[in-house]
Amino acid sequence: MSDVQAHNNEYFNKKAEEYDSMPQALEITKRACDIIIKEYTAATSEDHVKNASVLDFGCGTGLVALRLAPDVKHVLGVDASEGMLQHLNHKLSTREEYAAVRGKVHTVQHLVTEDEPLPESETSKYLSSSADNEGGFDLVVSNYVMHHIEDVQGVINTMARKLVKKDGWLIIIDLEGGHQHHHGDHGDHHNHQKNQEQQGQHHHHHHHHHQHHHQHGEKKEECHKAQDNHTAFVDENGKPLECVAHKNGFTLEGFAEIFKNAGLVDVSVTHAYGINMQRHGKEAWADAFMAKGRRA
């Protein structure tokens, strides 16, 4: 396990109990789930949605999984954080509001890798092909997780090639634009998009620079450059969190290239929404993108 992954686990194990009370977490979850259902329905059909098997990558406390569950057939939540999953399962088993989906949501603690995309028992259940079932998930989703991942291309490759079934879809929602800014630093969203387009080539290169260093075992401090003022990724003392690998976010063009490199087709990467995030009494604006692609 890498240093960044270890910091991820430590941080989210500590934050599990309070994570659901963060207003921005609830807001971005609602928006993400609305987008996921809308986009998957548009790409397939309402019948596909109702009968879909879904994998929620980096499911955390289940905010996405539990909201998606009523609309689909089954959700498997996968996360490396034991604390997050314990909180999810506690909610699922004790809260009456989730009684109707208890048989539809399951979880597994696992670090997804190319060699072991799922543990052996889940591989046999979900990924093995049979006469009446093609292995894999109809839909794989991930919300605000990719900026925590060191080797984004490698993880997307694994999801696209080993977790999504043939003709299935991968939908990712994460931080857009290569940078965030304090609320009010720019004008309207159109001006912000123009700035993104002008800076897109630079940030695309910077993003892959992160991957290059992490893959070769360089110091994780590389990912902290130019992020000192990002209020969304600092602790209560203003110190940058070590559990975020890509604090600059991603460009639309750069993430589209990642999807295409993974072999996905019908790729679409678009602006999803903007949100004013509050952390430690400070405000910062963040833009989110939606990326979707189909396994041919």
Image (cartoon, rainbow, N blue to C red):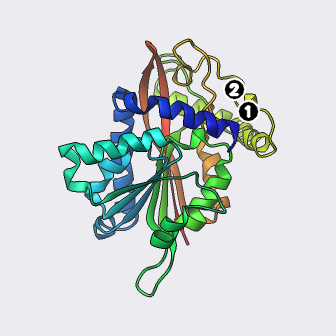
Res 259 visible? no
Position of the C terminus by quadrant: bottom right
- Mark 1 surroundings: few (<14), some (14-19) or many (≥20) residues within 10 A: some
Q: Going 79% across and 40% down the picture, which residue do you hit? A: 213
| Among the 4 quarters of the image, the one containing residue 114 | bottom right
Q: Position of residue 75 (x, y in %)?
A: 37, 58
**Residue wearing tag 2:** 224
Residue nearer the viewer, 22 or 273: 22
Q: Going 60% across and 52% down the picture, which residue do you hit? A: 256
Residue nearer the viewer, 194 or 233: 233
Q: Going 45% across and 29% down the picture, which residue do you hit? A: 15
Q: Position of residue 239 (x, y in %)?
A: 61, 16
Q: Which mark is residue 7?
A: none
Nearer the observer: mark 1 or 2; the answer is 1
What type is the residue that disc 1 sits on? Answer: Lys
Q: Tell me whether the residue at label 1 lies in contact with that at label 2, contact meaning CB atoms closer than 8 angstroms.
A: yes
Q: Which mark is residue 220?
A: 1
Q: Secondary structure at mark 1?
A: helix
Q: Is residue 11 above or below residue 72?
A: above
What type is the residue that disc 2 sits on? Answer: His
Q: Is residue 162 above or below residue 255?
A: below
Is residue 36 left or right of 9 when viewed as pictured?
left
Q: Secondary structure at mark 2?
A: helix
Q: Position of residue 129 (x, y in %)?
A: 50, 80
Is residue 135 left or right of 252 when viewed as pictured?
left
